[in-house]
Image: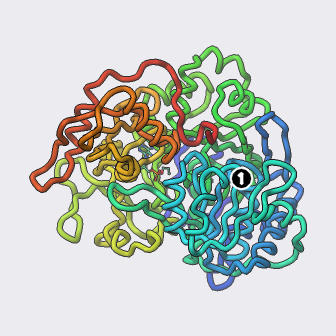
């Protein structure tokens, strides 16, 4: 295939034939946008392949927990999502309404997302590994009108406060047994009964398509809204970073709720016409090598934590599987250390590349490429993306003086979030002088490669998941024993950091093992095991600034001086473990 030249693209590096650095946003726009720039995520990702005659091509291969396997063609996926859209419309769902989804990886998740987009509604996936507290705050902030959930997860984590969710009109569930409980509607039965007809809603690039929550250092979680135009970035980056084409079998291990699952588990591979592997189960090294081998996966996208977990099971296990269809592997979410990248390359025999982006950027912005990769670095900005290292100065920004500073991106990316839902103040604070400020501290080397230094704030990174200390602290403050609390990340060799809490007690409560266990259980029930603090330290007084703010940095230093957990026990971590 001869590709048109891109106006904004850098020259393609030599090395990997599949990588298409010349395929930029202009090419994506030409392929995906209709008159007046209209673009719809579902039509672009699925329907257009059917219209082009590729309806019989396999879109999804869903592998169940007991390894039952179901293939779904592009034509079938188009029809299922048409029915889902008709069903949602029948319930009164209008463009701009939020459809929240509490489902694990699986066909229902894809049908729900695509159906929502076909109505012009906003898809808002939530982490099934979260407990009732974080789910409630997100559902409230999202103002969801429809919730589609696994029935068990709904009953355990939402039912108790459903009536307090003012805007929530419909709860559709995937029943655990033959039928669902009274008051709930069966998602699959409704879809089966819905008519297949109806063209997708005509949406503009800026119309909201998905809403993903990310944590803030203070205050409520931030709901980043992305427009339908993000699909342009997903198509372009899918080609530039992974070289995706319909010949690829592509597998992304991310858990729904994390933007990686929406952007690169769903949109990017489907818009490129790939076959997407969807594994419904959690992490299991043998199962994962089996999938790479048996499904003939060609491109694999995962996290550094997963690679470290695979490393623990040894290279010999990896080499006992013939994964020779694989041509590229990559990771996101936290730094991919040079040793992990090298291990991946040695054992899988393909380039193992770091990619950088965040919930707000909506798509990969910086990445290594097969030719010229610098292991340990985040890589180079993708074509058309302008990145800088800055310091904040008043309301503007200036170039960082000593080489290390905050990573800023020119705010002209179609995938960039358009707003934090209901929070114009924090939205404004994220931009200055036409730049989006990422909150990451980086350095750029003499060749232009970016190296991750740390966060500019107190966010905790655990198993590639970004966790805000404030949310964890607020949950534990609900316990009557807790007078003051500071939560920080303790370095961890496997998952990078684990959240640990420093707690000052109210009068009348005595520190000790029993209270520690009680607080840990309380936190796990409320927050979910994936993000709850792993340890509690009792303190007499909390270190504070002169203005009374808890000095998390000092707590962090204390936590870091503790011996790391070398037990080898793999902790629960989002994206890779089961719900409970
Ligand atoms: O701190 C950076 C880190 O993860 C943050 C974004 O997290 P989240 O919004 O949950 O989305 C992650 C997946 C899109 C970033 O601000 N991060 C992400 N990728 C890398 C990284 N840190 C270092 N190296 C990376 N490759």
Closer to us: 572 or 251? 572
Residue at image point 23% right, 42% down: 507
Residue at image point 53% right, 37% down: 573
Residue 330 x, y percent position in the rendering: 56, 40
Count the marks.
1
Q: Secondary structure at mark 1?
A: strand
Measured along the vertical axis of the image, is residue 1 above or below residue 577? below
115 relative to 121 in the view: left or right: right
454 relative to 99 in the view: left or right: left
Mark 1, residue position: 150
Residue 428 x, y percent position in the rendering: 34, 73
Is residue 205 among what the camera can see? Answer: yes
Closer to us: 413 or 477? 477
356 relative to 55 in the view: left or right: left
Q: In which quarter of the view is residue 33 placed?
A: bottom right
Find the residue positioned furthest to the front: 508
Residue 333 x, y percent position in the rendering: 48, 44
Closer to us: 5 or 104? 104
How packed mark 1 is, by other alpha carbons closer than 10 Å (few <14, some 14-19, many 20 or more), is many
């Amino acid at each position: 295939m001869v590709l048109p030249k891109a106006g904004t693209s850098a020259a393609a590096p030599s090395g990997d034939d599949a990588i298409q650095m010349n395929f930029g946003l202009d090419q994506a726009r030409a392929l995906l946008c209709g008159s007046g720039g209209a673009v719809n995520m579902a039509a672009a990702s699925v329907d257009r392949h059917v219209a082009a005659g590729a309806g019989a091509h396999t879109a999804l291969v869903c592998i169940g927990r007991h390894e039952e396997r179901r293939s779904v063609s592009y034509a079938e996926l188009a029809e299922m999502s048409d029915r889902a859209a008709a069903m949602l419309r029948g319930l009164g769902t209008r463009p701009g309404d939020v459809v929240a989804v509490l489902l694990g990886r699986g066909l229902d998740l894809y049908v729900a997302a695509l159906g929502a987009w076909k109505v012009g509604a906003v898809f808002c996936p939530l982490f099934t590994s979260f407990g009732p507290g974080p789910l409630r705050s997100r559902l409230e902030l999202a103002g969801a009108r429809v919730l589609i959930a696994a029935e068990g997860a709904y009953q355990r984590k939402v039912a108790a406060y459903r009536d307090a969710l003012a805007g929530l009109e419909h709860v559709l569930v995937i029943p655990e047994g033959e039928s669902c409980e009274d008051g709930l509607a069966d998602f699959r039965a409704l879809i089966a009964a819905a008519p297949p007809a109806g063209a997708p809603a005509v949406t503009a690039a800026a119309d909201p398509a998905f809403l993903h929550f990310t944590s803030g250092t203070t205050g409520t979680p931030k709901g980043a809204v992305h427009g339908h135009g993000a699909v342009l970035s997903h198509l372009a980056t899918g080609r530039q970073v992974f070289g995706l084409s319909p010949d690829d079998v592509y597998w992304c291990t991310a858990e729904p709720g994390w933007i990686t699952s929406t952007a690169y588990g769903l949109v990017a591979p489907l818009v490129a016409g790939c076959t997407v592997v969807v594994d419904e189960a959690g992490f299991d090294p043998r199962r994962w090598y089996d999938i790479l081998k048996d499904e003939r996966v060609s491109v694999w996208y995962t996290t550094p934590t997963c690679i470290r977990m695979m490393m623990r099971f040894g290279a010999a296990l990896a080499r006992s599987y013939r994964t020779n269809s694989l041509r590229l592997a990559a990771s996101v979410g936290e730094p991919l250390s040079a040793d992990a990248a090298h291990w991946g390359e040695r054992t899988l025999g393909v380039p193992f590349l770091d990619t950088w982006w965040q919930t707000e950027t909506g798509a990969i912005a910086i990445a290594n490429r097969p030719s010229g990769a610098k292991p340990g670095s985040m890589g180079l900005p993708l074509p058309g993306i302008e990145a800088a290292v800055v310091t904040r100065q008043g309301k503007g920004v200036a170039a960082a003086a000593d080489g290390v500073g905050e990573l800023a991106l020119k705010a002209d990316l179609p995938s960039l979030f358009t707003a934090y839902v209901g929070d114009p103040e924090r939205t404004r604070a994220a931009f200055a002088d036409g730049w989006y400020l990422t909150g990451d501290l980086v350095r750029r080397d003499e060749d232009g490669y970016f190296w991750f230094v740390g966060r500019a704030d107190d966010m905790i990174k655990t198993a590639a998941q970004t966790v805000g200390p404030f949310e964890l602290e607020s949950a534990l403050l609900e316990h009557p024993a807790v007078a003051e609390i500071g939560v920080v990340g303790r370095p961890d060799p496997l998952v990078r950091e684990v959240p640990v809490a420093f707690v000052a007690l109210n009068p009348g409560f005595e520190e000790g093992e029993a209270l520690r266990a009680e607080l840990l259980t309380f936190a796990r029930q409320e927050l979910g095991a994936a993000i709850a603090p792993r340890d509690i330290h009792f303190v007499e007084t909390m270190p504070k600034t002169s203005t009374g703010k808890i000095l998390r940095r000092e707590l962090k230093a204390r936590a870091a001086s503790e011996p790391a957990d070398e037990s080898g026990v793999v902790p629960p971590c989002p994206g890779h473990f089961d719900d409970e």
